Amino acid sequence: MKKYEVYKNIRKRAVLFGLPLSLFALMMCSILCSLMIIIFSFSLLMVIGVPVLNAGLYVVLLNLERIKSIFFLGSRFPKHLSNKPKSNFTYNTL
């Protein structure tokens, strides 16, 4: 019988092709725009140049994510989660 291990990294961010979702969405928008440029352009230079620009953008975004993760020192999530409203009142007795 097949055993499944428990997924413990539920708090980590989702990653697609090595990019977080926001950068992946930016990459997909860039690819869609470049496809429109390729469809409506009549230049061989554009057809060759646009995929090169997309590949360059992908490499830059990967390096940006790697550098950002190196310099991130704090925790993404708080240690304790609470629904109690914050109040300025103190309940210490005199």
Image (cartoon, rainbow, N blue to C red):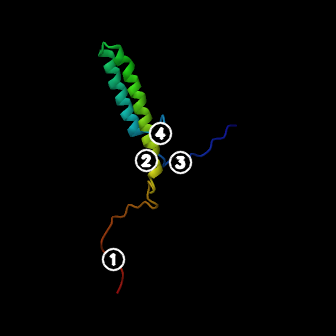
The mark lying in front, picked from 3 and 4, is 4
Instruction: State the residue position of label 1.
Output: 90
Secondary element under disc 4, as helix, strand or loop, is strand
Residue annotated with mark 4: 15
> How many dots with numbers?
4
- Residue 64 at what x, y percent from top left? 42, 42
Q: Which three-letter amino acid code belongs to the residue tagged 4?
A: Val
Mark nearer the N terminus (2 vs 4)? 4
- Report helix, strand or loop for mark 2: helix
Q: Which residue is mark 2?
A: 68
Question: Which residue is at the front of the view, 42 or 16?
Answer: 42
Q: Residue 16, how many percent across, how many down?
A: 47, 35
Residue in the image at 43% along x and 28% along y: 55
Residue type (three-letter) at the residue carrying disc 3: Asn
Q: Earlier in the sequence, mark 4 or mark 1?
A: 4
| Type of amino acid at the residue the image marks with label 1 | Thr
Name the mark on residue 9.
3
Query: From what the image shows, is residue 69 above or below residue 92?
Result: above
Q: Quadrant of the N terminus?
A: top right
Of the image marks 1 and 3, the number of the one nearer the N terminus: 3
| Residue at mark 2 to residue at mark 4: CA–CA distance | 14 Å
Q: Locate residue 14, reporting x and y percent.
A: 46, 41
